[in-house]
Amino acid sequence: MSTVWLNDRFLPAEQARVSVLDRGFLFGDGVYEVIPVYGGRPFRLQRHLRRLERSLAAVGIDNPATRDQWTARIDELVERNGGGDQGVYLQVTRGVAPRQHVPEGELEPTVLLMSNPLPPRSGIARVSAVTLPDDRWGHCDIKSIALLASVLLRIRARGEGAGEAILLRDGELTEGAASNVFTVLDGVVVTPPVSPRLLPGITREVLLELLRKAGIEAEERPVSEQELRNAREIWLTSSTQEITAVTMLDGREIGDGRPGPTCRRADELYQEYKRLQVE
Ligand code: PDD
């Protein structure tokens, strides 16, 4: 049975209880992070904590812990749950209060940390994707727990036999329902620039750094729907899925239907970087 951190202490997951008046439960009023852990070590933790700070500030919730406190709790959680490769889920909601949209008075944020083992990797994962209109809200750069739109998009994709929904807004690629999207256009890696339309993914950021360091041209610029459809390669990035090749888009093969050469190189760079972090 796994251990979680709730508010001020560690306890077994099945004993963790949150009030029905929690604003996370009633309104989805909170933010979160998902942090991968390799060999017992959180990966790019400072970047995740920085993004958490941004999300909290954007929605006006006080950060309930310092970076050192977050780090210590995450390290202990990972250890209590057996080390190795894990995905840590961190959530902060505005807290418990009578149900009214505008909260009154000082609230105590509700803090949850939990973790699950990451499934063992065997090569680059592959996925079929479908394009769907991006009907989420206008602040997708905030890692909000209010994920109904993303959940419905993923369910719709699943209904069409796909593992991810690749989202289009005003004729341009934004991101996946729970991932960032990279394309290869005329031999150049291209991913949409950070903006309120997409989450500034930590995996995206690491990968851009690694590609550029390896001398592979990588641009951040808008990608039109047409460019997406004509891309030689498409892949997704996220903390839990790492690099996942999109081998089929809307029922049509991408490239030759296998992870392309740039995707394979990107994955090599990423795996090598992960190994260096662990050693
Ligand atoms: N999701 N875009 C969206 C909408 C996401 O939900 C995610 C990650 C990403 C990738 O971000 P990162 O590389 O920092 O994980 C992009 C997490 C994993 C989730 O909701 O489970």
Image (cartoon, helix red, strand yellow):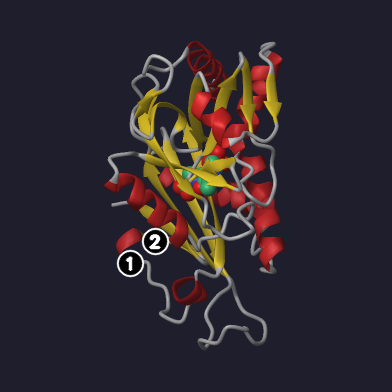
Amino acid carrying label 2: it is: Leu
Q: Residues within 10 Å of mark 2 (few under 14, many from 20)?
A: few
Amino acid carrying label 1: it is: Gln
Q: Residues within 10 Å of mark 1 (few under 14, many from 20)?
A: few
Disc 2: residue Cβ within 8 A of ligand 1's nearest atom: no
Check residue 15 in the rendering and tell me which mark sits there, or answer none.
1
Q: Residue at x 60, y 52 (%)?
A: 70
Q: Is residue 81 visible?
A: no
Q: Vertical placement of 143 versus 98: above or below?
A: above
Looking at the image, which is closer to me, 74 or 213?
A: 213
Q: Residue at x 58, y 83 (%)?
A: 101
Q: Residue 148: x, y in percent?
A: 44, 62
Q: Vertical placement of 139 versus 175: above or below?
A: below
Label 1 residue SS: helix
Label 2 residue SS: strand
Q: Residue 155: x, y in percent?
A: 33, 52
Which residue does the numbered mark 2 point to in the structure image? 11
Looking at the image, which is closer to me, 168 or 139?
A: 168
